[in-house]
Image (cartoon, coloured by chain):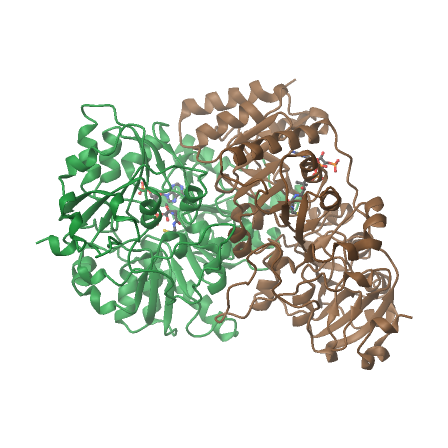
Chain colours: A brown, B green
Amino acid sequence: MYRDRIRLKSLWGKVVTPEEAALLIRDGMTIGMSGFTRAGDAKAVPLALAERAATERLKVTLMTGASLGNDVDRILTEAGVLARRLPFQADPVLRKAINRGEVMFVDQHLSETVELLRSRQMGPVDVAVIEACAITETGGIVPTTSIGNSATFAILAEKIIVELNLTQPLDLEGMHDVYIPTRRPFREPIPVVTAESRAGLPCIPIDPSKIAAIVVTRKQDSSATILPPDGETRDIAGHLIEFLDREVRQGRLGRSLNPLQAGIGTIANAVLHGMIDSPFHDLTMYSEVLQDSTFDLFDAGKLTFASGSSITLSAGKYAEVLPKIGSYKGRLLLRPQEISNHPEVIRRLGVIGINTALECDIYGNVNSTHVNGTQMMNGIGGSGDFARNAHLAIFVTKSLAKDGRISSVVPMVTHTDHNEHDVDVLVTETGLADLRGLAPRERAETIIRNCVHPSYRELALDYHRRALQRGGHTPHLLEEAFSWHLRYQQTGSMQPA
Amino acid sequence: MYRDRIRLKSLWGKVVTPEEAALLIRDGMTIGMSGFTRAGDAKAVPLALAERAATERLKVTLMTGASLGNDVDRILTEAGVLARRLPFQADPVLRKAINRGEVMFVDQHLSETVELLRSRQMGPVDVAVIEACAITETGGIVPTTSIGNSATFAILAEKIIVELNLTQPLDLEGMHDVYIPTRRPFREPIPVVTAESRAGLPCIPIDPSKIAAIVVTRKQDSSATILPPDGETRDIAGHLIEFLDREVRQGRLGRSLNPLQAGIGTIANAVLHGMIDSPFHDLTMYSEVLQDSTFDLFDAGKLTFASGSSITLSAGKYAEVLPKIGSYKGRLLLRPQEISNHPEVIRRLGVIGINTALECDIYGNVNSTHVNGTQMMNGIGGSGDFARNAHLAIFVTKSLAKDGRISSVVPMVTHTDHNEHDVDVLVTETGLADLRGLAPRERAETIIRNCVHPSYRELALDYHRRALQRGGHTPHLLEEAFSWHLRYQQTGSMQPA
Ligand SMILES: CC(C)(COP(=O)(O)OP(=O)(O)OC[C@H]1O[C@@H](n2cnc3c(N)ncnc32)[C@H](O)[C@@H]1OP(=O)(O)O)[C@@H](O)C(=O)NCCC(=O)NCCS
Ligand SMILES: CC(C)(COP(=O)(O)OP(=O)(O)OC[C@H]1O[C@@H](n2cnc3c(N)ncnc32)[C@H](O)[C@@H]1OP(=O)(O)O)[C@@H](O)C(=O)NCCC(=O)NCCS
């Protein structure tokens, strides 16, 4: 029954068990696996690998597109298989191992990993493990719900293991656009000039003799846990849509806006969801992850086209959308993350990028990754690719965390992922700060007034006032810059006693 | 005698004194002036403006390409003309006014200013003041030793004042390539695929009726003060060339390397100078500023082509090169800074970017702009455009400043312009740290070992050891992260008593 999905018949003999396939992976190797934000990840071989590690020394460098589902990162961490991990993760157990220094995590801009591999600044890739919904007559690999870095992993790898997932609908075929930039010094412009542009192939072109094993699986993608919008995320969405509407009325954007990107997570999803009742129409997306809201916008007739690198849905939406995914054909394209996140394309299209900050500071610098400047949360992901090159780089966050014991707007961020130069607009539930064309002292004024929660506003004003007395382009009191964080560490709250 | 430089005869009547031209500029206006790193700046009208400010209220927003020569920024500051200034400056008097909060300085990536103007997120531009060596038969403006933002300023401005500089050699004509990206949503790829690519026009195409005044000048560009290489800059160059040679031997680069970019200043100039005696050949540059070393490399037969946005030379080199600039025709192209610094092109070409850090930290984050996180030095300039998109993002700095009272490598930078994700290689005179593919803990180890001056090494190791005990992906002791800076403020030295 699975054989009709392996259209190059000479590969039929390659079908093996996950355990047999996993034997191709040996201690010390560098492995490139499919998987981007829980979608289209390899689901069987990594588990077989974890089992083997119980009885033999087996440590690898694991590269993926982005985060994985099916607890793969947890299981591999617990089995002690991960020596190095890149370029992104979002697993609580792996996160702890990274923060203990047990797994070397290399946190990279998502567009850059394969560029480093291609130029041999990292690598080589020994084995690629790629989930597929089919293999074509010529041996091309048809990916599933994500492309991520799969295409380049497969092209560069010495050997390829294909995980043929029978639960992934064959209707996905034709929804991928695999374009790989040509090699320097002969690199041509990337021929993507609209969200809709088709530039490449519907499958990953490889030499079929590199396919060393095929494993048949039936496990579904893990679902995303998207919390329903609450009052605060609704307020954030409201401020942002009001702002965009003003941009339209002032003639800086059309009613279809520019192509939209939205980061993963509850707030970004809520913001996109808010577009359903907005005055905008014929929207397009040029994003990484297509979430529930993408399909809600399609179904509401608001969205004409969505380009991404993965389809990551909640359980309910997954059950609803996947069986009818064919009905979105012609309106939806999945690309390698190098292309979905490419500076060249994002700048050309003038994408509106909406990403979530962990914390930001009164001058508009954003920390996306490090709690207290030390503990890794997930990674920078694609937020830098988008924010640096966007027409509008928007960061959203709730103004408070941990029931108000943390202010997400602080005097100085403890780690900078996006600095003043790359942050155009900051939004919390209390308001929106439009930072374009402002100097730091002006940025601080509007951020404190609009984005800091009232319970911290006077404290922020006091810091800024005293810093101003000391002067400087970006006034700070270095000895107090992290005092809020230190107070939280000492007393459990950023609020003074 | 100047009339043969105004080939559109109907413009002859527009020639006026600088004072008359300056009357076009009124209080509250936004002015775009030519000038990039002391080259090709407007030299007469700004001085007339400063004089007027003695007797009337006159405050403007001044935009340029980058820094100006001829003390223009000082004179305008002292006259109180500058309300806002962007996107870069390097004048000691203006710097102080910025740090006192008297001039609102908007520090931007150099590729981005005109993108913001074009999309009307800043602006409008009331008057453009552009230095030219000629006006063509159709009214096109032929720039001089820089293009910077001049083309877009002129195209967007309501009125244009041309400063026709008779000392600028007419041989410059034909050495400019004015390409302006098409408008979104119809933007096409930028047709620059090698350093040599010609994509646009030899002059700035404008409606000649916008030329409201022409001023004839005879003042030369200010010269750059490039210090001769010393032992330390020679060591930095040595480490870097050794590293690049290793990249060649390992097959990651060819003997012609990739196109080179080097930031302004003594160290960058010394590094390029070091290439004269290197094993590399047929080098190309895709840079912003072409300094003395560019012409030394040409004359040594090492360089085949240089693309930049300005020619900025020391006094001796200026006197030598300018009169024979025509002999470099076909080997040298000046582009708008939007194109010389464009993410799309830099990534496509795989530029090797070499920029100077003010300070960096043990994890490889770089501060290019803010002393003690507060006092602006110059601005981020093009360093972010290049570092983010380069094949290799290299930062250089001497390991010590202020006679050893400051370590340029600190536990945590007080301001982040380039973070861990964008810094591949760090070089000081003590050594080189290759950070590619490393996790923060590993980065710290190699940076401390190779780049920290011996007189601070034990101190850095001690900080890192104690931070490691506390754990985290990027171990820090928040309460001590700025202790070196605070000690310097309190005692005049980062060294403990
Ligand atoms: C920043 C980021 C972690 C926010 O994630 P999120 O799920 O929307 O945010 P939440 O509000 O649920 O916060 C996540 C956790 O951080 C905590 N947190 C939030 N703000 C905090 C702060 N300022 N300080 C400390 N902890 C904070 C929350 O309390 C929560 O903790 P918990 O897991 O113990 O409940 C996430 O968006 C991210 O990883 N971004 C970087 C990558 C990226 O932007 N990619 C874009 C394209 S995919
Ligand atoms: C970083 C930058 C300021 C270094 O400039 P430089 O002229 O090579 O450096 P110098 O070593 O002469 O240092 C300049 C001043 O900073 C001081 N300085 C250097 N390191 C310092 C540190 N870590 N802390 C405090 N002051 C420091 C020097 O003592 C010197 O002071 P002085 O003017 O009182 O003598 C400069 O390269 C810059 O502005 N870069 C940002 C823009 C950029 O990178 N553009 C790239 C393309 S043009």
Closer-to-camera residue (A121/B441):
A121
Q: Position of residue B285 (x, y in %)?
A: 37, 64
Q: Position of residue A208 (x, y in %)?
A: 74, 78
Residue A395: horizontal and vertical position, in percent?
Answer: 59, 38
Residue in the image at 54% along x and 46% along y: A390
Quadrant position of residue A152:
bottom right
* Residue B459 left/right relative to B467: left
Name the image quarter holding the N terminus of chain B: bottom left
Instruction: Identify the residue at image location x=21%, y=27%.
Output: B53
Horizontal side, residue A228 vs residue B36: left or right: right
Q: Quadrant of ligand 1?
A: top right
- Does any portion of residue B479 appear in the rendered image? no
Vertically, is B2 above or below A250? below
Please identify the residue farthest to the right as the structure is shown: A1
Q: Residue at x 39, y 56 (%)?
A: B340
Q: Nearer the viewer, residue B384 or A2?
A: A2
Q: Residue at x 42, y 37 (%)?
A: B122
